[in-house]
Amino acid sequence: MIPRYSRPEMVQIWEPATKFRIWFEIEAHACDAQAALGVIPKANAEAVWKARDVEFDTARIDEIEAVTKHDVIAFLTHLAEIVGQDEARFVHQGMTSSDVLDTCFNIQLTRAADLLLADLDGLLDALKRRASEHKDTVRIGRSHGIHAEPTTMGLTFARFYAEMKRGRERLENARKEIATGAISGAVGTFANIDPAVEAHVCDKLGLTPEPISTQVIPRDRHAMFFATLGVIASSVENIAIEIRHMQRTEVLEAEEFFAKGQKGSSAMPHKRNPVLTENLTGLARLVRSAVTPAMENVALWHERDISHSSVERMIGPDATVTLDFALARLTGVIDKLVVYPDTMLANMNRFRGLIHSQRVLLALTQAGVSREDAYRLVQRNAMKVWEEGKDFREELLADDEVRAALSAEEIDDKFDLAYHTKHVDTIFARVFGTT
């Protein structure tokens, strides 16, 4: 995490102060449950809550950890300094460090997921608005980077909307899957703590009890969570790549908003570069880099080891903070994207009707010409456009073999752009539920 690519609300989730506050709540709620069961005195459980409004001293905890070499013990020692040694003697009763660490980590991930879901809602709103705005803005579709057939800019936005909507649905499922807690003690058998304590803590903190833990919550849950973040990041890059292509000088069908006073190059004053979407491509790579380590964390030794711990201390904050920033940046790009319909039309007409070749091919086959001969006739005239700059319609009209099957009126009809956009409303209804 660096400030340049961070937003405060997401960063706060991963601050030490937030982590220690969650640790405290886990321990305090566990004490309440233990007192209700008669395991510890109610007065001791109530005393722990004296730290409810205390700001934990992270420097002091670090100082203790430097001696103990154990972060949870350092925190518990500091907590006892606040509430009193005798009052705190039942804190962490029957628990193990992973009960605190894993439950806290999952709370942080669910909070991060909530912010990311809100980010996606904002992006979806922007994509839907731009799709509606450009539903009928015709542009050339490309395959292999080469002109194919007409589509619309609205369909491009709609396609990205549908992709991000799927990403949101996946994240909702990933959030549900990660929202578990475990207060099951050493090796997860509840030998020294009643399962009712886990149920109480999870209820208070908005989690579901982990059905079966070892000494840790199973890491396949986390692997799924980070894999979902990786897929969403890839969708961010998918949109960014399209915009970067459209902003190329020789294409210029759309470009990032260029603010007054903005500079594109330290050397060339004329430059207007797609810096935001290039940045998004890079940020997507960073988010995806968390996926493989998360997958490798699934295989832990026996009931517990800590090979996953160092990984998660980094990928938890880094992946969520980075994706949060990327989604917000992409929303701004979409919201302010400058679209050039006239350039789209000019680009589409650059090769003099060549994009209508399939319609002519199909018309010839429907007129009784074999597909092999029809392809030969259309390609023969199409190559003249590529190689000699000819006009496709004129070449077809001058081709005796083509004219033997199709009249001039039938050929002209195959160059109607409206033919390619006649089902846009149908697609919009599928994507948005309305035209």
Image (tube, helix red, strand yellow):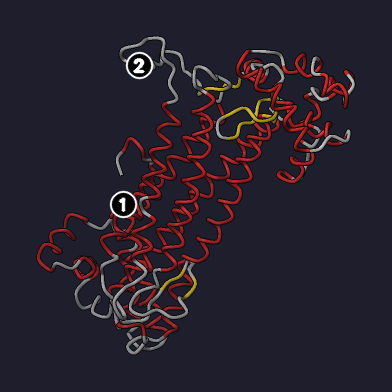
- Say whether disc 2 or disc 1 marks the residue closer to the N-terminus: 1
Q: Residue at x 33, y 84 (%)?
A: 41
Q: Residues within 10 Å of mark 2 (few under 14, many from 20)?
A: few
From the viewer's side, name the closer residue of 166 and 152: 152
Number of labels in the image equals 2
Residue at mark 2:
265
Residue 46, x across and y down, in percent: 35, 74
Is 79 left, or right, of 339 in this rendering?
left
From the viewer's side, name the closer residue of 391 and 138: 391
Residue 426, x across and y down, in percent: 79, 41
Residue 18, image quadrant: bottom left
Q: Residues within 10 Å of mark 1 (few under 14, many from 20)?
A: few
Q: Residue at x 42, y 31 (%)?
A: 278
Q: Say whether marks 2 and 1 touch (CB < 8 Å).
A: no
From the viewer's side, name the closer residue of 239 and 106: 239
Residue 8, x across and y down, in percent: 38, 42
Residue 111, x across and y down, in percent: 45, 56
Q: Residue at x 36, y 82 (%)?
A: 188
Residue at mark 1:
15
Inspect the image, locate mark 2, and give the three-letter code of the amino acid beneath it: Ser
